[in-house]
Structures are given as structure tokens and as C-alpha cells.
């Protein structure tokens, strides 16, 4: 009887531990979801209040603002352009098509047809490799680490060849001392936008049923 009582106590203690573990995991998951929601809400409130209501806005930002925006490019239908202090395109990487000359690219575009990033993991790896170069922590679909060169080869399977900066743009364009003027714009892809690639599109308030794309332009100060 004494052994049975001890066994019941141990079973009760184990069940209590499992229950506490489950509650802890659930709490951490909810906290992370809440943080993500707050970040997205804050960003969307800024864009809605200024970019949509006032048509345009600018502010001076650093890498702490730009890097999170880059991470959301493939998740929230973005385009992000970079320019130098004179308004000239600031090269992020290059693309070579059909054996031609390398084309300088100053935009991170979730809809660019010149390269295909099929899975969420490949999109994340692309952003990581662009930001951190050979220091990027790249993973395959199973979560195993993959070499930088192997990832680059996986991108270059068609007629386009992508060349990313091996040091990453965090050490160059987004160095800790660099500040950028940020300009928001929203446009509808079905409409022709004057100065696409060279300016910040504005909102067409008359079009309400089309899918909008957010455009962010960063000008080096």
C-alpha cells in the first residue's frame, strides 16, 4: 500500500510538471504572437496614418528600422529601393541574364521575375545572405546548416545568375553610422507609375478594390 501511495504521488507530481510545462510553452507562444502583432500594428498604423492619409512622408532612420523592413519584404508585399545621397541607385547585388553583362539592382522586390525564391526558407536565406554575406546562418528545409556557396548555386539554376555581396550589405550600406531618409509610397501594380525605380509612388485614392503594393525608398544621408 505504501508503495502504491508513493507511485500515485509520483504520478501526480509528473502530471503537474507536464501541465506546468504545457502552460509555459503556451504562454511563450502567445507572448511571441502578441509581440509580432504589436510590431505589425505599429508599422501599419504609421503607414496608414501618414503614407495613405497624407499621401507621403519622410523620416530619418538607421539600420534598426531598415533591417526589420527588409525581413518583411516577402511576407507583406513590399518593394524597398536604395539610393545614394545624390539620388542615384545604390547597388545591393547584381543579376546576369542570358550570359549578358551584370545588371546592378538597387531594389528588394517580392515580385521580381528575374529570380525565383520558391519556399519560405529560401526567401529567408536570400534575405540573410543579402544582409550578412558569408556570415549568414543559412538553413535547408530540414533546418540543417548549408554552406553559402551551395545556397548561391541553388539560386542560379535558370538563365539568371545572382551575385550577392560576400560581406553583406549590413557591413557596407547599412553600417551602424549610416542614416537614411525613408520615403513611403503605395501604388497599384496594374497602374503605370511615373518614375518607378526613381521615386516614391503615391496613393490613388480613387482605386479601392485593387491589391496595393507598399514601396519604401531609402536615401543615404
Image (tube, rainbow, N blue to C red):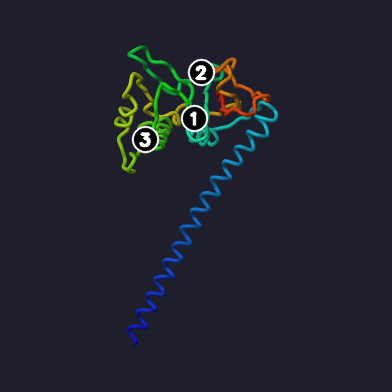
The quadrant where residue 157 appears: top left
SS for dot 2: loop
Mark 1 or 3, nearer chain start: 3
Mark 3 vs mark 2, foreground winner is: 2
Q: Is residue 51 left or right of residue 176?
A: right
Q: Residues within 10 Å of mark 1 (few under 14, many from 20)?
A: some
Q: Is residue 124 left or right of residue 197?
A: left
**Residue 87 image offset from top left, x and y in percent:** 56, 17
Q: Look at mark 2 in the image and give the residue it sits on.
A: 89
Q: Look at mark 1 in the image and give the residue it sits on.
A: 174
Q: Look at mark 3 in the image and give the residue it sits on.
A: 135
SS for dot 1: loop
The quadrant where residue 212 appears: top right
Mark 1 vs mark 2, foreground winner is: 2
Quarter of the figure with the N terminus: bottom left
**Residue 188 image offset from top left, x and y in percent:** 58, 24
Mark 1 or 2, nearer chain start: 2
> CA gap, disc 1 to disc 2?
15 Å
Q: Is residue 72 above or below residue 34?
A: above
Quarter of the figure with the C terminus: top right
Q: Is residue 140 above or below residue 220?
A: below
Amino acid at each position: 500500500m505504501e508503495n502504491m501511495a508513493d507511485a500515485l504521488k509520483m504520478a501526480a507530481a509528473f502530471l503537474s510538471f507536464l501541465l506546468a510545462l504545457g502552460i509555459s510553452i503556451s504562454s511563450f507562444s502567445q507572448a511571441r504572437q502578441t509581440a509580432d502583432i504589436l510590431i505589425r500594428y505599429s508599422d501599419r498604423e504609421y503607414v496608414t496614418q501618414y503614407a495613405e492619409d497624407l499621401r507621403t512622408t519622410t523620416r530619418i532612420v538607421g539600420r534598426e528600422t531598415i533591417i526589420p523592413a527588409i525581413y518583411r519584404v516577402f511576407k507583406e508585399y513590399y518593394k524597398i529601393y536604395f539610393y545614394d545621397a545624390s539620388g542615384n541607385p545604390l547597388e545591393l547585388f547584381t543579376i546576369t541574364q542570358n550570359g549578358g553583362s551584370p545588371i546592378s539592382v538597387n531594389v528588394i522586390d517580392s515580385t521580381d521575375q528575374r529570380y525565383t525564391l520558391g519556399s519560405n526558407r529560401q526567401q529567408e536565406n536570400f534575405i540573410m545572405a543579402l544582409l550578412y554575406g558569408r556570415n549568414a546562418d543559412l538553413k535547408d528545409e530540414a533546418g540543417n546548416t548549408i554552406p553559402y556557396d551551395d545556397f548561391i548555386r541553388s539560386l542560379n539554376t535558370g538563365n539568371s545568375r545572382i551575385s550577392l555581396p560576400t560581406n553583406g550589405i549590413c557591413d557596407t550600406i547599412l553600417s551602424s553610422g549610416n542614416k537614411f531618409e525613408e520615403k513611403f509610397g503605395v501604388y497599384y501594380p496594374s497602374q503605370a507609375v511615373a518614375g518607378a525605380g526613381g521615386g516614391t509612388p503615391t496613393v490613388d485614392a480613387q482605386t479601392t478594390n485593387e491589391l496595393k503594393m507598399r514601396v519604401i525608398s531609402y536615401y543615404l544621408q
